[in-house]
Amino acid sequence: MAQFDITFFILLGLAALCYITHNNTVTCAVLLLLLFKLTPLATYFPFLNQYGLTIGIVILTAAMMVPLADGRLSFNDIVKSFTTWQSLLAIVVGIAVSWLGTRGVSLIGANPTIINGLIIGTLIGVAFFRGIPVGPLIAAGILSLVIGKG
């Protein structure tokens, strides 16, 4: 008799819920995990667990730097970033968000079950408040400030 694996059905349900709530990013991530789970790629779960976040951050950072790399963001544009209070505030907020992300990674590393609540919160935000599915690490960082971890 085949062993019953509830995690498959949880992932499948999560993929369906994410699809219904138009959370395409999480839908793709869950479908990728299902692909791993249902194929010999499952042997790479430890690698994905250890390096997936770093790989994702590298890709995200590279995508954010495309305007600099392709020449749409000039040196003058960068200098202008220091000339208005809005731009200076954006720099401060960027620093704060980066710091919160670090706290979030620490919290998730120390307490991996936190990610479940973050996913559910993201789904609720997308489904009922017209939110977009960004910033789980930042959310974890804010949570770390509230619960005193990180």
Image: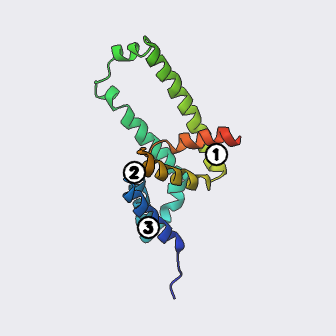
- In this rendering, would 127 be left or right of 101? left
Q: Is residue 60 above or below residue 91?
A: below
Distance, label 2 to label 3, CA atoms, is: 15 Å
Q: Is residue 97 above or below residue 52?
A: above
Quarter residue 145 falls in: top right
Q: What is the secondary structure assignment of the residue under circle 2? A: helix
The residue positioned 37% from the left and 58% from the top of the image is 19
Which residue is denoted by mark 1 in the rendering?
A: 107
The residue positioned 38% from the left and 33% from the top of the image is 64
Which amino acid, mark 3?
Leu
Give x and y (percent) for residue 43: 49, 66
Quarter residue 15 falls in: bottom left
Which amino acid, mark 2?
Thr
Q: Is residue 134 above or below residue 76?
A: below
User: Outermost residue, front direction?
Assistant: 128
Q: Nearer the viewer, residue 4 or 65?
A: 4
Which amino acid, mark 1?
Leu
Which mark, residue 12? 3
The residue positioned 63% from the left and 49% from the top of the image is 109
Q: What is the secondary structure assignment of the residue under circle 1? A: helix
Badge 3 crowding class, 10 Å Cα cut-off, few under 14, some 14 to 19, many 20 or more, is: some
